[in-house]
Image (tube, rainbow, N blue to C red):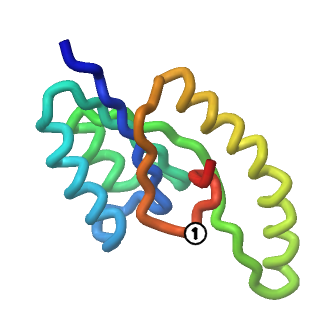
Amino acid sequence: MSKQIKILFCFHYSILNNGGVRSMVDIIENIIKKDGVTVYVVYPTRKETAIDYLEKLGVKTIYLPFYKLNKNGRKGMWKYIIKKIMSPFLFFKLRQIVKREKISIIYSNTIVIIMVLF
């Protein structure tokens, strides 16, 4: 009896025609064909075409509004501070999901999301 492998993909965007997202969707399409593999997707923005498509394939999707941490001008600085304050809470929520679902592998193809660095 083989062990169930659970893979969590962390998307930074949820529109299918985005290059990074399309690349991960291609990987997921191949992985879900394998026995003993369950795929989860965490996405930070409202549900768009990529998430709809993955749900039709049977992928488990989880909305978690984690943030890109960037500063742009004075207005951007306030947003940055708020995001910095919120990030530990969102990190904790993501960590709970990983533990509860017994995720084996976490995959992200971006460096703009600090949430997946644990």
In this rendering, would 118 be left or right of 21? Answer: right
Residue 78 percent across, percent down from the top left = 87, 71
Q: Nearer the viewer, residue 71 or 30?
A: 30
Q: Residue at x 19, y 43 (%)?
A: 31
Q: Is residue 44 above or below residue 61?
A: below
Q: Residue at x 41, y 33 (%)?
A: 104
Residue 36 percent across, percent down from the top left = 21, 25
Q: Is residue 118 above or below residue 112?
A: above
In this rendering, would 38 be left or right of 115? Answer: left
Q: Quadrant of residue 105?
A: top left
Q: Quadrant of the N terminus?
A: top left
Residue sitting at the far front? 1
Residue 116 percent across, percent down from the top left = 57, 52
The three-letter code of the residue at mark 1 reads Val
Residue 70 percent across, percent down from the top left = 71, 75
At numbered mark 1, what does the secondary structure look like: helix, strand or loop?
loop
Q: Which residue is mark 1?
A: 112
Q: Nearer the viewer, residue 117 or 74?
A: 117
Q: Residue at x 48, y 44 (%)?
A: 42
